[in-house]
Image (cartoon, grey):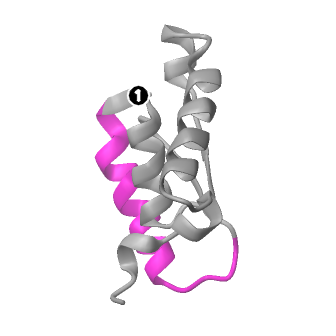
Amino acid sequence: GMSGPAIKPIALRAVWEVYQSNLKIPIIGCGGIQNTHDVLEFILAGASCVEVGTANLVDPTCMIRMIKELTSYCKQHQTNLKNLIGLAHRKD
């Protein structure tokens, strides 16, 4: 099967489209997430949380780094991840 960065564009679009359908369930983004930037893309597209798979095989400590970087990002921008979910869809 396919995994890793090769499927990220497809997975990101799927999250985007599911979020636009206005379902009232959490969306789990997965597919090609390698770093904090990727996590933020999925959250902004509408994912409530993300799953990191292949990147853990390359760097088993990647999750620790991503959590620290996300925490720092949120502090720097005075927000939290909940406020970022689906932000790319908002027009205001």
Magenta stretch, residue numbers: 6-25
- How far across and how far down the image is residue 80, in percent? 62, 59
**Badge 1 is on which residue?**
4
From what the image shows, is residue 23 above or below residue 46? below
Outermost residue toward the right in this view:
25
Which quarter of the picture shows residue 27? bottom right
- How far across and how far down the image is residue 91, in percent? 33, 88
Outermost residue toward the bottom in this view:
92
| Element class at badge 1 | helix
Q: Which of 45 and 3 is in front in this view?
A: 45
Q: Is the magenta stretch mostly helix, strand or loop?
A: helix
- How far across and how far down the image is residue 2, in percent? 40, 30
Q: Residues within 10 Å of mark 1 (few under 14, many from 20)?
A: some
- How far across and how far down the image is residue 21, in percent? 49, 84
From what the image shows, is residue 78 above or below residue 17? above
Which quarter of the picture shows residue 51? top right
- Residue at the spot x=61%, y=11% of the render? 60
Magenta stretch contains residue 23: yes
Magenta stretch contains residue 85: no
- Residue at the spot x=41%, y=62% of the render? 14
From what the image shows, is residue 69 above or below residue 19? above
Which quarter of the picture shows residue 88? bottom left
Please state if 9 lies on the left or on the right of 60 as rendered: left
- Residue at the spot x=49%, y=21% of the render? 55
Q: Which amino acid does label 1 sit on?
A: Gly
Q: Quadrant where the C terminus lies? A: bottom left
Q: Quadrant where the N terminus lies? A: top left
Q: Nearer the viewer, residue 6 or 71?
A: 71
**Number of marks in picture:** 1
Q: Which of 23 and 40 is in front in this view?
A: 40
- Residue at the spot x=56%, y=51% of the render? 74
